[in-house]
Image: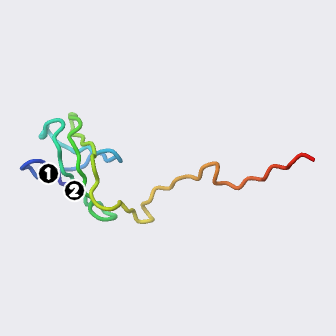
Amino acid sequence: MVVESGDRRLDLETIDLSPCGVKIRLDRPVFELGTPAYLHFDPPYGGPLDVHAIVWRWDPDGSAFFFIEVEGDEISFPSSHRPSIPAGPDSHPRASPTAPS
């Protein structure tokens, strides 16, 4: 993953990725809290992903970034990587109630 902020451009290792942010491995804090950053991901599936984020937190093993905006039209996953969502109770056919005689 590439992180760009100000005049810095760093190629860093991702520790954890979630829908709201990412944690990257750093030996020491490099960016001030609240600093805006531009993150570039190139995952093994789909296409590259560019995200605007801010430095949210410092931890002993790295810094956490909170996603502000994803660039591009939409994120797509190949069918083999799409999350499966179980059907809810309303998706099953039900017997119609019988009217009393």
Q: Mark on residue 4? A: 1
Q: Quadrant of residue 43?
A: bottom left
**Does the CB distance between marks 2 and 1 fall below 8 Å?**
yes
Q: Quadrant of residue 35?
A: top left
- Dot 1 falls on a residue whose secondary structure is strand
Q: What is the three-letter code of the residue carrying label 2?
A: His
Q: Is residue 16 left or right of residue 63?
A: right
Q: What is the three-letter code of the residue carrying label 1?
A: Glu
Q: Is residue 30 left or right of residue 70?
A: left
Q: Is residue 84 left or right of residue 8?
A: right
Depicted 76 relative to depicted 89: above or below: below
- Quadrant where the image shows the N terminus: bottom left
Q: Which residue is mark 2?
A: 40
Q: Residue at x 21, y 50 (%)?
A: 13
Where residue 11 sits: x, y (%)?
15, 53
Q: CA distance from mark 2 to mark 1?
A: 8 Å
Depicted 80 relative to depicted 29: above or below: below
Where residue 44 sits: x, y (%)?
31, 63
Q: Residue at x 25, y 49 (%)?
A: 14
- Dot 2 falls on a residue whose secondary structure is strand
